[in-house]
Image (cartoon, coloured by chain):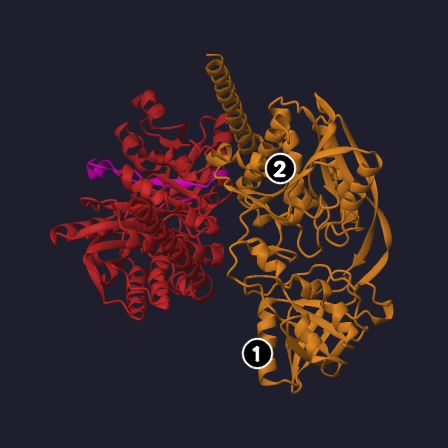
Chain colours: A orange, B red
Amino acid sequence: MKKVITLFLLSSLFVYSQTEDEKMLNNIYETALTKSKCYDWLDYLSNTIGSRLSGSKSAALAVDYTKGELEKLGFDRVFLQEVMVPKWVRGEKEQAYIEIKGKKINVPICALGSSVATSKKGLKSNIIEVQGIDEMIEMGEDKVKGKIVFFNRPMTPIHIQTFRAYGGCIDQRSSGAREAAKLGAVGVIVRSMNLRLDDFPHTGNTNYGDLPREMYIPAAAISTNGANLLSDSLKENPNLEFYFKQSCETHADVLSYNVVGEIKGTENPNKIMVVGGHLDSWDLGDGSHDDGAGVVQSMEIASIFKNLGYKPKNTIRVVLFMNEENGNRGGEKYAELASEANENHIFALESDAGGFSPRGFSIDADEANFAKISNWKSLFEPYLIHYFAIGHTGVDIGPLQSKHIVKAGLQPDSQRYFDYHHAANDTFDAINKRELELGAATMASLLYLFDQHGID
Amino acid sequence: MKKVITLFLLSSLFVYSQTEDEKMLNNIYETALTKSKCYDWLDYLSNTIGSRLSGSKSAALAVDYTKGELEKLGFDRVFLQEVMVPKWVRGEKEQAYIEIKGKKINVPICALGSSVATSKKGLKSNIIEVQGIDEMIEMGEDKVKGKIVFFNRPMTPIHIQTFRAYGGCIDQRSSGAREAAKLGAVGVIVRSMNLRLDDFPHTGNTNYGDLPREMYIPAAAISTNGANLLSDSLKENPNLEFYFKQSCETHADVLSYNVVGEIKGTENPNKIMVVGGHLDSWDLGDGSHDDGAGVVQSMEIASIFKNLGYKPKNTIRVVLFMNEENGNRGGEKYAELASEANENHIFALESDAGGFSPRGFSIDADEANFAKISNWKSLFEPYLIHYFAIGHTGVDIGPLQSKHIVKAGLQPDSQRYFDYHHAANDTFDAINKRELELGAATMASLLYLFDQHGID
């Protein structure tokens, strides 16, 4: 009999708890869809402040603006964390053309982040196409020396999750210049990481690693249409020349900040749950998807909880990281300070995959915690959130280590992401208000469930 | 022992069959993402032919074009079904303004489909705002007579599936003019069915029902920004006047066509599976999402099967229906001819909810068949297709009745759909190639599974 009663109690407890959770998630989504501020915040970040490259004036404005907005949201404290960040400046608009027998055909390029400039006159040379670093190394110094190397391996269309296709190409952008320089190349042109055929060059960081500075060679991205034209032209005229000119510069590091808002936990103030995105962006668009969306969604969570009068048991920190794009200094600084202060981080959630319709979460956890989170799936079903899988969660929260930390990354629908990523068309008009709000609600829901039911 | 062997055989059969299905779905998605023609077809339909309102020259061009493309795809036969369709013509661009003490403020409107014109000079009158037909009826003839009625109930943002919000508003557009006319109103202005605040008026059909023709009153949609402005202005000046002018006309019915491509089933040629979308569109944009996407996705299925050398057991008909938007004459004609010929339709699948990233299917089936389809869910998981629920499937396949027919409607992500629906911005640039292809692959996969495993 006792067993029966226990079972009964347990099951009614379960039903009660389910119902409370269901009600709370419903309230979270309704609040996000009717009272959210995230779209207006993003409008300001994107259209009034604009792109926010680390070390720029507008990045500093974004720090001031978001700090001010966080202060209006009733956090227990809002503070800045000092971070020294690189300052790379694009300079004048880049120029490039293909020259075939004296005839010049312009193509759209942009310097890769951290790249050096060409000489003031620009750089003209023969160009060789490769499908990747390995192919170039196999060719050897003889064929590479004195030439521009054109890395043209496209994102493969067959992956349903486009980040997988991105992962399959990115070494060309991040390491292509370094490896080409070792073989005596004079410059590098990289096919834009874009699944679409269009005229936007997509920037992103390149990394010279431990090459001596005098060996650095200029690197630029070419639009996908431009890459196809160049490839076709090379098939007809292997000896064509490619010209490009860019005047980018790396300045001394600059003082910048992570912006942090903290709500003290009512029961476990020393257990910390981080939620964030990155404040900095590339300089070509206005960084609405990457990662203005993640910034305002993270802020929105605090707004939703305030609206609902929800006091978290554990401490919540909304962290707007600086410098994800070309250094991750903000993510590293946050982790360093957390470690120095012996803080106990139990959860970290990042949104840095665009402001599109949310599908679920990638999760970094041990088996038991992953199973626990997966058990919450049914609670998300009414909101069409279905994706819970082990995977990469976020660059900014990457360095954060703690004994039992669970990490998660919001996974929006990824089909359109690389149409905009790091390009001039990553702008506010590509954002749908409801999709942005649904992402914030989905994050708030996971944070709430985590706060209520903790980890094992 | 025998039992064990039977179980073993059954389970290995099951494993085999799963593996074959998994392989086939993988091939379908890869083919769609690498060899599809749907994006190019839609480019032609949208950018070369343009909007395809029933009875228009461009609708006729779309019949010719799609028939020609189907003929290239190796169908056993391609044929047209004659359908008489209404011909409504918008005429000159509509004009509207709010007049407050002699000051005129222009607002964006468009005539509702099937509406009558105003007089040539236009119509100016006092205007009263209501939240719906019931509220208007409650006001009574006294307050309505001689006035324009402004139906301003917005789509509610809280529904995750935006079609539900649409369903909660649509009576204002479809029946508002008829009901207002009965109370002596002189015109009707309806808030656009759009969840976004913008300047696009969204058309759609209005239905005078059995009102005598002399009682018809002109009806137009106003953009959501315009509706808010009008509502605010009315709060300040309840006596303001509203002016609008439209010159739309209904002509005599016109001969048009459903376009049908048929692949004869190898095992059950008399069992028919229909897949389709509608060829006609509203006249303001180019009908890329509504429903050019559904048309080219349906065509793509045949292309995918041809590419893979897949010969269906049951007969497949790709049906491009005419006149979904303002009459559903094509859907009715198809059903009528099927019934006359005593055809056995076992399955009908429609795509008419936009070309966005697919999430799953709404299904109209009995419990056993719904359970069977739901069992295929795990096969769709790698493609992030998760939504299988009983619901409305499609207007065109609605009239089709057969003893054991199962119907399904592709359900793409619905968040952005009403940003474009029936408006001037429903254009090709709002289509993402991969999303369109993934929708086609998702439809082809369901059709394949249905063909292989049938219904109970």
Q: Give the secondary structure at mark 1.
A: helix
Could you say where residue B234 lies in the image, as x and y percent from the top left? 47, 28
* Figure check: A314 above or below B362: above
Q: Is residue A111 magenta?
A: no
Residue stretch rendered in magenta on the structure: B200-225
* Figure check: A407 above or below A16: below
Q: Residue furthest front?
A: B1
Horizontally, is B310 left or right of A120 in the view? left
Residues under labels 1 and 2: Cα distance? 45 Å
Horizontally, is B135 left or right of A285 in the view? left
Identify the amino acid type marked 2: Cys
Residue drawn at x 29%, y 43% as measured from the top left? B116
| Residue that numbered label 1 is attached to | A232
> Which chain hosts label 2?
A
Is B305 in front, or is A137?
A137
> Which chain hosts label 1?
A
Is A100 in front, or is A85?
A85
Residue drawn at x 38%, y 62% as measured from the top left? B45
Q: Residues within 10 Å of mark 1 (few under 14, many from 20)?
A: few
Q: Residues within 10 Å of mark 2 (few under 14, many from 20)?
A: many
Horizontally, is B364 left or right of A87 in the view? left
Asked if disc 1 and disc 2 are in contact, CB closer than 8 Å, the reply is no
Identify the amino acid type marked 1: Asp
Is B82 in front, or is B13?
B13
* Figure check: A390 above or below B210: below
| Residue that numbered label 2 is attached to | A38
Dividing the picture into quadrants, the one containing residue B210 is top left
Indicate the quadrant containing the C terminus of chain A: top left, top right, bottom left or bottom right. Answer: top right
Dividing the picture into quadrants, the one containing residue B309 is bottom left
Q: Give the secondary structure at mark 2.
A: helix
Could you say where residue B3 lies in the image, as x and y percent from the top left? 30, 44
Q: Is residue B222 magenta?
A: yes
